[in-house]
Amino acid sequence: VEAVQRLETAIKSGDPASIFKQTRRAWSKMKEARLEVAFATLFAEGLLRLPSKGDDADLITRIALLSPLYEQAARTDVDNPLLKSAQSVAIGEPKAIAALPLTTAIEAAFSGDHVPHYLSEMVKENRLGEAILRAMALTATGANGDAGAVQSGLAFLRSVGLEDTARRTALQLLLLDRLDQG
């Protein structure tokens, strides 16, 4: 709470150096509490307005990619391959710039060729809700190292029109530090 309050005070001051310092501090605390997405939702808009470069730009981009403003964050200039991969996901055109099994799986999921047959059949049987839940479970299971499961889950979500959900899920898989990305 104190870290967020200090960030809010820094933002009110308008001093970029102070804002960046407090953002790094608050981000570290939010990661410990696993509140990165909530933090991003609250602060991305203001942080995206700041002129930034280097590590500060990378951090702001990472935060904003986890927020509803992910498409806007895709337009920032970064050098980090993982962030570049995430930016390509944000615009719905994933490229495995960071050569990881997860980025490759996400790129394949967005090609639309990997929708599990059993989930498509569930949709035909008017069991869309159940199919979505199974796709979410599949994706969550895949987050622990099964790139094929991630690929199948995301491909299904996109196939039933849940593009925003698929993109935001893929961004979280890429950017949150609780997943095995090797």
Image (cartoon, rainbow, N blue to C red):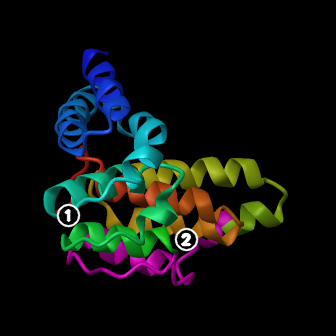
Residue 139: horizontal and vertical position, in percent?
A: 45, 55
Nearer to me, 64 or 93: 64
Residue 53 magenta: no
According to the image, label 1 marks what residue?
Answer: 53
Residue 100: horizontal and vertical position, in percent?
A: 21, 72
Q: Residue at point 62% right, 47% down? A: 133
Residue 163: horizontal and vertical position, in percent?
A: 62, 65
Disc 2 crowd rating (10 Å Cα; few below 14, some 14-19, many 20+) is many
Residue at disc 1, secondary structure: loop
The relative height of residue 76 versus residue 45 in the rendered view (above or below) is below
The relative height of residue 47 versus residue 103 in the rendered view (above or below) is above
Q: Is residue 106 visible?
A: no
Q: Is residue 151 visible?
A: yes
Look at the image and tell me in which quarter the C terminus lies: bottom left
Q: Residue at point 48% right, 75% down? A: 109
Going by the numbered disc 1, the residue's amino acid type is: Lys
Residue 117 magenta: yes
Nearer to me, 151 or 65: 65
Q: Residue at point 54% right, 61% down? A: 166
Look at the image and tell me in which quarter the N terminus lies: top left
| First in residue order: circle 1 vs circle 2 | 1
Residue 47: horizontal and vertical position, in percent?
A: 37, 47
Q: Residue at point 19% right, 39% down? A: 24
Going by the numbered disc 2, the residue's amino acid type is: Ala
Inter-mark Cα distance, 1 to 2: 34 Å
Residue at disc 2, secondary structure: helix
Task: Tell us which disc is closer to us: 1 or 2.
Answer: 1
Residue 155 numbered mark, or none: 2
Q: Residue furthest right?
A: 126
Nearer to me, 103 or 148: 103
Stretch of the chain drawn in magenta: 92-119
